[in-house]
Amino acid sequence: MNRATLSLAAAVTALAAVTGFAALTTPGTDSGTAAAAKAPTRLPVERSSLLCPAPSNSEVAETVYTSFTPAGGARGAGTGEAAGRAELKPSAATSDATTADPGKANTPKKAPAADKPVLTVTQPGRPVSAEADGGDAPALVGAASGRLAPGWTTQQTTKVPAGGGRGMLGVSCTAPDTDFWFPGASTVAQRADYVHLTNPDDTATVVDIELFGPGGALKSQVTDGVTVPARSDVPVLLSTLTADPAAEDVTVHVTTRSGRVGAVVRSADEKLGSDWLAASADPAGSLVLPGIPADATSVRLVAYAPGEDDAELSIRLAGPTGTITPAAAESLHVKSGMTAAVDLQDVTRGEAGSLLLTPLRKGRATPVVAALRVVRGKGDDQEVAFIPATGPVGERATVADNRAKGTTLSLTAPAEDAEVKVTASAGTEGGTPATTTYKIKSGTTLAVTPPVPAGLKGSYALTVETVSGGPVHAARTLAEPDDGLPMFTVQTLADDRGTVEVPVAGQDLSVLDD
């Protein structure tokens, strides 16, 4: 009798380290005796992927890319000293946003002159940056490996000083996925909202885009989906996808039939400027939307219930001293399959805050997605940004491209007191890291000017780590006034998932051969 032994522990560990996630279930036996198993261990991910959309079609656009991996490896995962590299390259092609045909494989607008990295990170703890001007800057696709993979993040910040797309547009480049929700989009005439689809892989993929307005699903003019060629970026104008009357509040649902994409919505308003609308957190009964600026002059909440049940949401504002119910709206009823919205006006009234959405009635938690449209300024001098619902920072979260002036960090503890450690990295061109610890009381939002590296040159990254207490939600506001315009952008911070829990089998699986 020959005995061949398979090392299940080694196989699962390798899978988890590469993909960032893995699961192992040990079935029960008839005798009720379960296989002995060791406690799971946490290992750093060994590969991460990021996608950045084509930044703008404006010839006067100025874009800065900043890429960073936190120093010290992933917490609780050892030193992570394996060699690695993190780089972003131009996509193979970008389709023309004005002529992209959702039902066809779109004709490339251009191809980059060379497949050279735009950004390369070679050392944890020190960000790198690059610049691109004009409307021909391509989408970027990239990967990080080894010790540079855990927590790798890239920020794309674009400034358009004039024209229909004017504004400060910021977005954290995203990992590829198969399912995205974007409440807060629009198909009205004064808005030009494009959903950018970036395919990182070597084969084409087909993407379905559904639009839901206040009356339910908008009739689609696209039956065959949107074809996204290999390693390409396709911007699709939302108003071309439906013949239904224009809707001010629209929820966009992006799914892939095969493969994966990066997805984000670029919104340009004739009166309010432009910015990126990132995807909302997955549908949930309770949501947190952190980081409403203290001087917001208009805040609009947009929510959608994707399930079969209506949602009754309680609306609360977590401010510096506690949680209050806004005078403009105490609750929001969201019908199943329909988009609902409410104007909260100047809800913060001079004090930064975060919106908390919870079930109006206990035991009636209906999953929803949500986002805020936030406006600063008045009259002709107004600027817009979007804040999607986001998960907690977890063990660690990072945002890059912070400046010595104009950076505000908002920290919200919705349920319990909490303490976090905030580390400012070295600068892109020099500087010494700095660290500060903050305590956040339950039900409040703490808005601070974060630590700045000593001797800072260039921009820097901020890393938030949970020290103790309950979950903390965070957002970074970057403000840079320009000729009277209060230009700004807000990015939320979510757990970087730099480690993965890997089950370790207590015994080998054996195959017996007669």
Image (cartoon, helix red, strand yellow):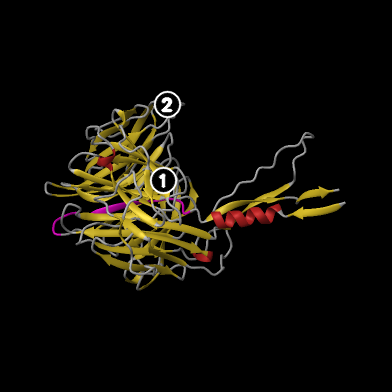
Residue 99 spot, x, y in % from top left: 25, 50
Residue 350 as seen in the image, left or right of residue 259 = left
Q: Which residue, as the protein is rendered here, is positioned at the far left?
A: 380
**Image height of 324 relative to 151, above or below:** above
Residue at numbered disc 1: 206
The magenta region covers 483-496
Residue 352 appears anywhere in the view: no
Per the model, the C-alpha gap separating discs 1 and 2 is 27 Å
Residue 497 as seen in the image, left or right of residue 248 = right
Residue 159 spot, x, y in % from top left: 23, 59
Residue 227 spot, x, y in % from top left: 38, 47
Residue 364 appears anywhere in the view: yes
Label 2 element class: loop
Residue 84 as seen in the image, left or right of residue 187 = right
Residue 463 spot, x, y in % from top left: 42, 59
**Residue 97: within the magenta?**
no
Residue 106 as seen in the image, left or right of residue 30 = left
| Tag 2: amino acid | Glu
Label 1 element class: strand
Residue at numbered disc 2: 308
* Mark 1 Cα-neighbour bin, 10 Å: few <14, some 14–19, many ≥20: many
